[in-house]
Image: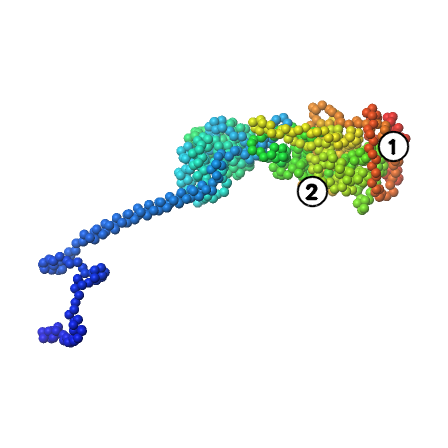
């Protein structure tokens, strides 16, 4: 016990000074600063008796009661969390609303000006009709006329609603249900397999927007759809849609599509045909019936099933319609009349300016002759293109006053739209020689003038005849009929190349012509239509023409926009010279290079042409009713296998002209029996020389001084009769196969012409 006491009462060292004074100093709770955090004294507990205290301390099972202040704090915490949730929800909703309004304003700012948000006019339709009033072709972005909804069979618009927008009559331009359904479908298919656009949205896109697939465009589409729904009724929107939607193959609107694919108006389409049209909207280029009939029919079956599901038709009607659509239509753009339509499209701006309404273009084209011309070119090429290595052809037929009756710019328009009758320029070869001979007769020569056919050397250039034969002294008629190159070159040098070029331009050639010595052989390029037009003065008495195809242009309501004026008479060939040329070119068909060309009962004239290395084959021939030119060759200017103007072109020309003149009253070519009278006989006789065989290649003589034209003789004078066009070959030894001379000297020549 003593040890315990000793230990419990440990020794204390005495303290002195300041420590001693502070030893008993203590701070009471009242001396502390309030809010001291951890030093804050606990609240005093209420006193309790020792028993209760001991009881509580001794028993470990009894828990202390929660204080009321803790419960209040927890309830306040829960209330604060819900409040904050509502607060932030409201804040986010407000910002989301502001963002949506901002997007709407931004998208609206990029829309066209509100004043321009009117239903735009449908692009104009250009309807091209023939001389008989029948429709030849249609041009323009929208090839079909607007058609009223009430005029369509009821199942036609229902087919579009069933497959494109079944809730059309219940939404306000944008269909949230459709968008959600499309999103779910696309998600399940892991790709874009279904669209959520309504018919109104599709119309808005077609009217005002581009086809680009961007979020901005989709938002603009939605805004415009809502605007359309506010401005127009459902039926008005549906009618606009049916008249504006694209159906492939250049057809816009149900009317154009029905005409293109079924050859009938949209008013008369059957239920299967209506289903096929509705099915095209999904992919018009891929499902066009004239390109993919199987795909179009399968899609039509899907539409029929959708119509039955929507209760627009019965199941029996759907089953009966499967496999019914008949697609008996011509391939789009296959007819050669489209070359004519393209040519018309090129000249419309010059005739009426900018087109802002539907127009009807009346033309000079004869549909029957157009079909005959097309068949003649296509059949000839089909039969002989491989044999002669000829791949293309062109034909132009016009009246002697320049009205084009038929034009073929190639063998197949759908394969090549290049117009070889108007745009292409090729060397005409000997078909250019009439301009040389006309220049010569205008300089004082006549069809009976004698010139020498012999080898020729012009500064190293040695033109040769097609047969490599030479006939010595020949008349101009014989030389032109037999297409002797050396005589044409000599004449060209005599009269001057520049004069030949002036003559060709005077008659209607518009292409640039090089005035060189080879111009006589047609080395400068021309188009088919200008060459045919330049031959027309020979057929009409000597008057220049302007080849044309458009006569009148009217609006669809009948207002006259253009009426072609009559060309003022402009005589470019005097009658006597025209008579000489007709006489000479008539011999080409009788005994010359175009002997295969004949039209029973008709007087015809013309000239063949073959360019260097057989690259181009031509024949231009005419009667009093038609002037027709044919060209055959290759687009790449490659040589043919000796295709000449007297071969394939003459065959095509003859086939066409025989058909064109059936049932037409026979008429003579003006001035084809012309005369120039005795006043010219001395001039003629002075130019006749006895034929002689050349000893070798002849050097070209300097150009002659062209004599002044003589005045025409009296109308009652002697008429010119062409001499025999088959002269003798120029050879030293007698040749049993030699052809007789045209005359046995000057006396015989005069007697032959004055007294026979």
Kindly state the secondary structure of the residue where label 2 is placed.
loop
Residue labelled with disc 2: 637
Which residue is more in the foreground, 594 or 712? 712
Residue 47 in the image: above or below residue 510 = below
Q: Which is nearer the N-term, disc 2 or disc 1?
A: 2
In the current view of this chain or complex, which residue is farthest to the right? 747
Q: Which residue is mark 1?
A: 685
On screen, residue 553 above or below 490? above
Pointer 2: residues within 10 angstroms few (<14), some, or many (20+)? Answer: few
Residue 430 is at least partly visible in this image: no
Q: Residue at x 18, y 59 (%)?
A: 42
Q: Where on the picture, by quarter, is residue 348? A: top right
Identity of the residue drawn at 86% across and 28% down: 678
Front position in the image: 143 or 371? 143
**Looking at the image, can residue 556 be seen?**
yes
**CB atoms at circles 2 and 1 under 8 Å apart?**
no
Check the image and report above or below for 634 versus 315.
below
Residue 681 in which image quadrant: top right
> Residue 175 location in percent, x, y?
41, 37
């Amino acid at each position: 016990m003593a040890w315990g006491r000793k230990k419990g009462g440990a020794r204390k060292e005495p303290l002195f000074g300041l420590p001693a004074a502070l030893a008993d100093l203590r701070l009471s709770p009242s001396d502390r600063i309030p809010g001291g955090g951890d030093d804050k004294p606990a609240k005093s507990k209420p006193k309790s008796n020792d028993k209760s205290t001991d009881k509580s301390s001794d028993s470990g099972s009894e828990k202390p009661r929660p204080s009321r202040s803790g419960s209040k704090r927890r309830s306040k915490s829960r209330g604060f969390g819900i409040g904050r949730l509502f607060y932030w929800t409201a804040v986010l909703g407000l910002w989301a609303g502001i963002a949506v309004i901002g997007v709407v304003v931004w998208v609206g700012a990029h829309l066209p000006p509100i004043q321009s948000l009117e239903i735009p006019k449908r692009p104009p339709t250009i309807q091209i009709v023939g001389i008989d009033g029948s429709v030849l072709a249609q041009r323009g972005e929208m090839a079909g006329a607007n058609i009223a909804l009430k005029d369509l069979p009821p199942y036609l618009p229902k087919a579009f609603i069933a497959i494109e927008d079944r809730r059309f009559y219940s939404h306000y331009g944008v269909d949230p249900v459709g968008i959600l359904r499309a999103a779910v479908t696309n998600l399940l298919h892991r790709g874009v397999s279904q669209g959520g656009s309504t018919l109104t949205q599709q119309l808005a896109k077609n009217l005002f927007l581009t086809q680009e697939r961007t979020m901005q465009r989709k938002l603009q589409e939605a805004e415009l759809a809502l605007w359309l729904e506010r401005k127009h009724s459902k039926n008005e929107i549906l009618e606009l849609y049916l008249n504006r939607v694209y159906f492939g193959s250049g057809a816009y609107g149900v009317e154009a599509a029905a005409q293109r694919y079924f050859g009938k108006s949209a008013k008369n389409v059957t239920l299967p045909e209506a289903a096929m049209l509705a099915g095209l909207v999904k992919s018009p280029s891929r499902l066009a019936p004239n390109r993919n009939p199987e795909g179009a029919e399968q899609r039509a079956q899907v539409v029929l099933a959708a119509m039955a599901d929507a209760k627009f038709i019965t199941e029996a009607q759907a089953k009966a319609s499967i496999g019914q659509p008949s697609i008996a239509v011509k391939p789009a753009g296959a007819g050669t009349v489209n070359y004519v339509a393209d040519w018309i499209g090129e000249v419309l701006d010059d005739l009426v300016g900018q087109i802002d309404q539907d127009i009807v273009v009346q033309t000079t084209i004869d549909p029957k002759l157009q079909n005959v011309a097309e068949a003649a070119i296509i059949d000839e090429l089909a039969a002989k293109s491989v044999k002669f290595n000829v791949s293309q052809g062109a034909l132009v037929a016009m009246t002697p006053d320049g009205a084009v009756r038929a034009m073929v710019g190639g063998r197949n328009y759908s394969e090549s739209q290049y117009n070889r009758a108007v745009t292409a320029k090729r060397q005409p070869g000997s078909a250019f020689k009439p301009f040389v001979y006309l220049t010569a007769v205008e300089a004082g020569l006549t069809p009976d003038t004698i010139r020498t056919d012999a080898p020729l050397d012009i500064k190293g250039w040695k033109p040769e005849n097609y047969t490599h034969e030479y006939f010595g002294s020949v008349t101009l008629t014989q030389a032109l009929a037999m297409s002797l190159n050396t005589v044409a070159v000599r004449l060209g040098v005599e009269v001057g190349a520049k004069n030949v070029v002036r003559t060709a331009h005077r008659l209607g050639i518009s292409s640039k012509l090089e005035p060189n010595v080879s111009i006589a052989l047609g080395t400068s390029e021309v188009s088919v239509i200008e060459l045919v037009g330049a031959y027309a003065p020979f057929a009409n008495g000597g008057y220049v023409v302007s080849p044309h195809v458009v006569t009148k242009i009217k609006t669809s309501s009948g207002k006259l926009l253009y009426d072609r004026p009559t060309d003022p008479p402009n005589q470019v060939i005097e009658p006597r010279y025209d008579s000489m040329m007709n006489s000479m070119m008539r011999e080409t068909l009788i005994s010359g290079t175009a002997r295969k060309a004949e039209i029973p009962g008709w007087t015809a004239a013309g000239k063949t042409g073959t360019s260097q290395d057989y690259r181009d084959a031509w024949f231009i021939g005419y009667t009093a009713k038609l002037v027709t030119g044919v060209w055959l060759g290759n687009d790449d200017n490659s040589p043919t296998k000796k295709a000449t103007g007297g071969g394939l072109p003459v065959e095509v020309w003859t086939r066409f002209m025989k058909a064109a003149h059936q049932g037409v009253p026979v008429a003579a070519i003006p001035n084809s029996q012309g005369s120039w009278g005795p006043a010219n006989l001395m001039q003629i006789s002075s130019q006749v020389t006895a034929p002689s065989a050349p000893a070798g290649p002849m050097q070209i003589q300097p150009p002659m001084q062209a004599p002044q034209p003589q005045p025409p003789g009296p109308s009652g004078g002697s008429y010119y009769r062409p001499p025999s066009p088959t002269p003798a070959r120029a050879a030293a030894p007698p040749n049993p196969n030699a052809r007789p001379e045209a005359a046995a000297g000057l006396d015989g020549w005069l007697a032959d012409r004055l007294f026979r």
